[in-house]
Amino acid sequence: MTGTEAGKLMLVYCTCPDERVGAALATYLVEQGLAGCVNVLPGITSIYKWHGEMKTGSEALLLIKCTAEKYAAVEAAIKDRHPYELAEIIAVSIDAGLPAYLDWIREETDV
């Protein structure tokens, strides 16, 4: 982690097969101090190709708020606990937001 990344925040997207799996993963990430907050959005519809076949399925989407410093640990935790052969893990930088909320995420992840 470079000095320019210190204190930066990330929003990580991760789909799960259902709300139960998503809630368990979200709880783990927050309990371990890897994420300040995880939203579990049940009932999304995903349309994709897998092994050349069109698929449609109902999933739950996790919106994981963490620091850039904790991202590698968040990714590892998802990969270790996720039931999919290939977990969707997409991270984007949070460039702006309510300063007090962003500070709260940093505090909750011990940064």
Image: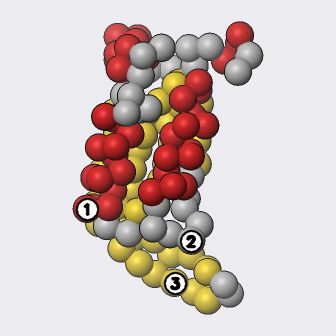
Mark 1 to mark 3 CA distance (whole Å): 21 Å
Crowding at dot 2, Cα within 10 Å, few <14 / some 14-19 / many 20+, comes out as few
Instruction: Indicate the position of residue 80 as horizontal and vertical percent values.
Output: 51, 55
Mark 1 to mark 2 CA distance (whole Å): 18 Å
Q: Which one is nearer the viewer's eye here, 37 or 94? A: 37
Q: Which one is nearer the viewer's eye here, 71 or 11? A: 71
> SS at mark 1?
helix
In this rendering, is residue 41 above or below 12? below
Instruction: Indicate the position of residue 33 as horizontal and vertical percent values.
Output: 38, 28
Precedes in sequence: disc 1 or disc 3: 1
User: Left or right: where does residue 29 sit relative to residue 5?
Assistant: left
- Residue extending farthest to the right is 2
Q: Which residue is mark 1?
A: 20
Q: Identify which amino acid the numbered label 3 is placed on.
A: Lys
Crowding at dot 1, Cα within 10 Å, few <14 / some 14-19 / many 20+, comes out as few
In this rendering, is residue 84 above or below 37? below
Crowding at dot 3, Cα within 10 Å, few <14 / some 14-19 / many 20+, comes out as few
Q: Identify which amino acid the numbered label 1 is placed on.
A: Arg
Which residue is depicted at the point 48% across and 14% down? 111
Render colour scheme: secondary structure
Q: Which mark, by number, is residue 55?
A: 3
Which residue is depicted at the point 38% across and 40% down? 29
Res. 71 visible in picture: yes
Q: Which residue is mark 2?
A: 85
> SS at mark 2?
loop
Precedes in sequence: disc 3 or disc 2: 3
Mark 3 to mark 2 CA distance (whole Å): 15 Å
Instruction: Look at discs 1 and 3 and give the one toward the viewer.
Output: 1
